Amino acid sequence: MNSIAIIEAVNTTSLPFHGQHIITAMAAGVAYVAMRPIVENLGMSWSTQVRKLMGTKQKFNCVHMNMVAMDSKLRDVLCIPLKKLNGWLFSINPAKVRDDIRDRLVRYQEECFTALHDYWTKGAAIRKPETTVDDRTPLRGIVNRIMGKYGMTYQAVYKLVHKEFGVKHIDELSSKQTAEAVEYLAGKVIEGEFLGKGEKGLSSFQFTDEDLCRLAWLWDIGNRMQDFAKELTPAMYSMKSAHAGKFHDFGKEFRWTFEQARVAIEKATLHIPYQPERDDNWSRVLPRLRKEIH
């Protein structure tokens, strides 16, 4: 290892790259990346990859760099130029990486094949989004609802997603990550992270989606019964019914309580997408629960 250059790092930072954060540093105008965190995040043997990198050190321009490592201590770290990282990933055997990363790596390598083909045959390679606009509809839905309910900006909500998943734009999210992003934002709603300073967070207990659907329908039925009681109140009084007062109370006095229940259930169901083309319980109750849906 002593046969390769040892250089001092400057401007050490962490950058998002294909769903994970990597440690980079500038030296002599070149951006370098620390390899050990990447190798270990992929679930591969570091000792094996060190031998591989050192065996092809001229190809990957390996250097030893003094930089602040993941444990915040100054260490001698094996690095390669950032521009070489894509080529190294392209050379990885998918069978050697963690199960939860394998599919992503295979898709990435297939994209590399296509990019090289397009570059040499068409003169340019254009990166296609990981997901379509339709794929991202549920994510846009929960972002819009968070913006409407908590007064946050579009940029502020998406910044949370970008940071969590290490991307610069939501079209870089895979289908799986898009679904995870919806759950991530819904979790923040449940934990009360979007609430104002004067409000209390919500309970850590979480209902299942089926439970929430039943609660939504319970609110809807109660709300309709309240309207019905209000309509019947004049008739009950004209009949001099002993129950007229109860009808009056139920039809008028509990409006605030029902509205607060609606708001609470609506917050807990922000992650549920409204899909009017589906004739199911959610598609029927959400338009009434979410007043903004027409």
Image (cartoon, grey):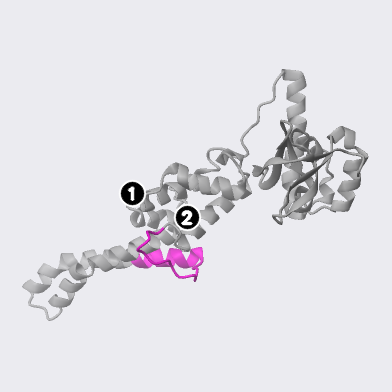
Which residue is painted at 8% across and 73% down in the image?
A: 237
User: Which three-letter amino acid code belongs to the residue tagged 1?
Assistant: Glu
Report the disc number at residue 292. Answer: 1
Quarter holding the N terminus?
top right
Does the magenta-highlighted stretch encompass residue 197?
A: yes
Report the disc number at residue 123. Answer: none
Q: Residue furthest bottom?
A: 242
User: Which three-letter amino acid code belongs to the residue tagged 2?
Assistant: Ile
Which of the two discs, 2 and 1, labels the residue nearer the N terminus? 2
The crowding category of the residue bearing disc 2, from other C-alpha atoms within 10 Å (few below 14, some 14 to 19, many at least 20), is many
| Residue toward you, 41 or 203 | 41
Which residue is painted at 35% across and 57% down in the image?
A: 289
Q: CA distance from mark 2 to mark 1?
A: 15 Å
Q: Is residue 277 visible?
A: no
Locate residue 252: give its quadrant: bottom left
* Residue interval drawn in magenta: 195-219
Which residue is painted at 53% across and 38% down in the image?
A: 133
Q: Picture coordinates of residue 62 (x, y %)? A: 84, 38
| Residue toward you, 199 or 104 | 199
Does the magenta-highlighted stretch encompass residue 102?
A: no
